[in-house]
């Protein structure tokens, strides 16, 4: 019998150079690789360690509920309890804050593309959590959360969600004979 050791921490790279970040990236939407909610459990002081590329701040989030897993080839989610990345600089987060996190796949690994991909929520019953779950359960079809456009707009994601809705509407009208 082979014993396989799984670390309790999922290390996720920061694709700081991506132009878009958040829950709605890409013209018609990029598929999520990992979406979860959790609690910020540790934050280090910001550093210039990554300079001149970006100012980095390492942080840890205790994973509490996973909504989507699409494991990339190299870095797999296997029920790890903690998420670690150096993308926390400028997020205005504190230890104890509850967040929802949106990760994508990049070159066979999980990736977090910038500050807007970690959203502070007021609790795990927050309306963004319900909307995110509905979106994921509908295979990321934005038409299923069209009623939530005002909610997402309040968090700065209205234009991106509207773009994804227009994309679906345009593709549906293009297929109607």
Image (cartoon, rainbow, N blue to C red):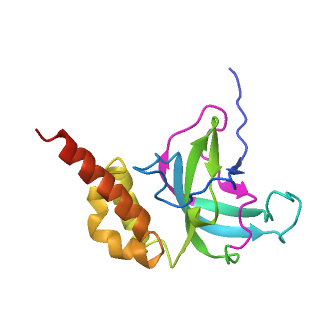
Q: Residue at x 57, y 52 (%)?
A: 103
Q: Which residues are magenta?
A: 64-90
Residue 96: quadrant of the picture? bottom right
Report whether 19 appears left or right of 171: right
The number of numbered badges drawn on the structure is 0
In the rendered image, the vertical position of residue 69 relative to residue 86, given as above or below: above
Q: Residue at x 60, y 56 (%)?
A: 19
Residue under the image location 74 percent in, 69 percent down: 89
Residue 2 location (% of width, % of height): 70, 22
Can you say which quadrant of the picture contains the C terminus?
top left
Horizontally, residue 90 falls left or right of residue 53, namely left
- Depth order, front residue of 176/118: 176
Residue 77 visible in the snapshot: no
When the figure is inspected, residue 87 is found, relative to residue 151, above or below; the finding is above
Q: Position of residue 27 (x, y in %)?
A: 43, 51
- Name which residue lies at 68% across and 51% down: 15
Q: Position of residue 175 (x, y in %)?
A: 19, 39
Give yes or no for residue 99 being in the magenta stretch.
no
| Quadrant in the picture for the N terminus | top right
Q: Is residue 87 magenta?
A: yes
Give the image location of residue 118, x and y in percent: 59, 65
Outermost left residue: 177
Dominant secondary-structure state across the stretch colored magenta: loop
Residue 75, quarter of picture: top right
Vertical placement of 146 versus 93: above or below?
above
Nearest to the observer: residue 56 or residue 54: 54
Front-most of residues 158 and 69: 158
Does any portion of residue 91 appear in the rendered image? yes
């Amino acid at each position: 019998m082979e014993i396989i050791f799984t670390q309790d921490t999922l290390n996720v790279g920061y694709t700081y150079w991506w132009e878009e970040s958040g829950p709605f990236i890409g013209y018609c939407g990029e598929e999520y690789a990992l979406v979860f909610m959790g609690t910020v459990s540790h934050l280090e002081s910001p550093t210039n360690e990554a300079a001149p590329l970006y100012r980095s701040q390492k942080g840890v989030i205790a994973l509490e509920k996973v909504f989507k897993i699409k494991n990339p080839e190299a870095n797999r989610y296997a029920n790890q309890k903690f998420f670690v990345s150096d993308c926390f600089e400028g997020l205005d987060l504190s230890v104890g804050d509850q967040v929802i996190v949106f990760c994508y796949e990049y070159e066979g690994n999980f990736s977090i593309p910038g500050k807007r991909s970690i959203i502070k929520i007021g609790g795990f019953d927050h309306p963004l959590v319900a909307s995110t779950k509905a979106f994921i359960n509908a295979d990321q079809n934005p038409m299923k959360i069209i009623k939530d456009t005002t909610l997402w707009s309040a968090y700065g994601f209205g234009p991106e969600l509207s773009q994804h809705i227009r994309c679906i509407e345009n593709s549906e009208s293009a297929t109607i004979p």
